Amino acid sequence: MRAVAVNAFGEQPQLMELPQPEPGPGEVLVRLAAAGVNPVDWKLADGAFGDAVKASFPLVLGTDGAGEVLAVGTGVRRFTVGDAVFGQFQRAEQGGGSYCELALADEDRIAHAARSVTYATSAAVPTAGMTAYNLIEETRTGEGKWVLIVGATGGVGTFATQLAAGRGAEVIATARPEMAELMRNLGASETVDHTAGPVADQVLAAHPDGVDVLIDMISGPAEFAGMTRTVRDGGTAVSLIGSADADDLTERNLRGFNFINRPSPQLLEILAGHLDAGRLTVLVGSEVPLTSAPEAIAASRTGRARGKTVLTM
Ligand SMILES: NC(=O)c1ccc[n+]([C@@H]2O[C@H](COP(=O)([O-])OP(=O)(O)OC[C@H]3O[C@@H](n4cnc5c(N)ncnc54)[C@H](OP(=O)(O)O)[C@@H]3O)[C@@H](O)[C@H]2O)c1
């Protein structure tokens, strides 16, 4: 089967022919129709997580995918051959990922796909959608709260904006002018142009008392510390890229933390339900063939994603 993989951390991803995997106990073999691209895909292939991640090579890239169950291993109870599923397929220790035609998933990393959307749409959801859902829960973003989302136009941000607005929060979304209308359509109350000057100054000019919650997926440690000026006394500030200094934030009477995603099959089911109920819009920016994965990764590295990129098999 065809796969896009690396032979060592830091190598250029390339198209390879790899043997078809066989499902072991608790594993599901899926004929993937589509794989979603996330920044974590190239971070993992770069070796950015160091000793925290054990990998075997060739290492197939990619986490998110959607497709049809081809076979199940012993003990699998939730799925049967022919089921439409979506979820997370990254198994670095075994060399597995989602940028391939046939992928194994642990049973508890996938769920039945939404019935009303294509595999390409489902494949765009798992990592960014679960991250956004957990973020909104863990920051207790809800009715009447003002939340500033930095990086709002990306995969996580577009889901977080919708989920926060759906709970009655007022979202201030960073967006270039050409993205402002789209973000309002997704539920943002206001947008702030991150290319027009410091975001914190712009937000404080409009909201001198500050926001209740800051969700920041972009800023490095120094910029994040500056961004937390926008958070009111007693508010919450979270970084997705490890930039929060919890002790410093506690001293300033802010609740701050570095977010780590906790995926679960229940969360995937909730997201599939939102998709079928029409409560969640998935912005698929481009669908390209698996062979274009190296270009898709290069585009993701620029940090200028326009909606989710999906690889189709
Ligand atoms: N901790 C976790 O568990 C976890 C989970 C998921 C993701 N993440 C991380 O979160 C980050 C975002 O992920 P993603 O999938 O949403 O990325 P993405 O889809 O690649 O989106 C990046 C977005 O950031 C915007 N952006 C770039 N520079 C900006 C700036 N200075 N100010 C405001 N917006 C800016 C871009 O818009 P423009 O091009 O218009 O600037 C683009 O829309 C990644 O680093 C990812 O690895 C962490």
Image (cartoon, grey):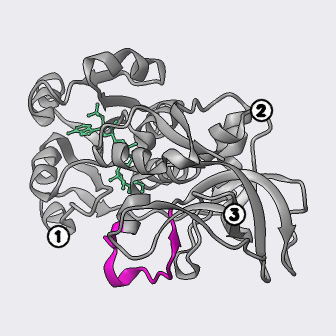
Residue at image coords 50%, 66%:
5
- Which callout, 1 or 3, points to the residue nearer the camera? 3
Residue at image coords 62%, 59%:
100
Residue 135, how many percent across, how many down? 44, 51
Write down the residue under mark 1.
247
For residue 178, above or below residue 219? above
Write down the residue under mark 3.
1
User: Magenta: predominant secondary structure element?
Assistant: loop
Q: Quick check: can you spot residue 119?
A: yes
Q: Amino acid at mark 1?
A: Asp
Residue at image coords 87%, 71%:
77
Q: Where, by quadrant of the figure, is residue 53 drawn?
A: bottom left
Residue 300, how many percent across, how many down? 36, 46
Mark 3 or mark 2, which is nearer the start of the sequence? 3
Q: Residue furthest right?
A: 81
Mark 3 or mark 1, which is nearer the start of the sequence? 3
**Residue 270 part of the magenta-drawn span:** no
What numbered label is drawn on residue 116?
2
Residue 10, how many percent across, how many down? 32, 70
- Which callout, 1 or 2, points to the residue nearer the camera? 2
Q: Quadrant of the N terminus?
A: bottom right
For residue 232, above or below residue 307? below
Q: For numbered disc 1, what is the local secondary structure? A: helix
Rounded to the nearest angstrom, the CA distance separating label 1 from label 3 is 49 Å
Q: Is mark 3 within 8 Å of ligand 1?
A: no
Q: For numbered disc 3, what is the local secondary structure? A: loop
Rounded to the nearest angstrom, the CA distance separating label 1 from label 2 is 46 Å
Q: Amino acid at mark 2?
A: Ser
- Which callout, 2 or 3, points to the residue nearer the camera? 3
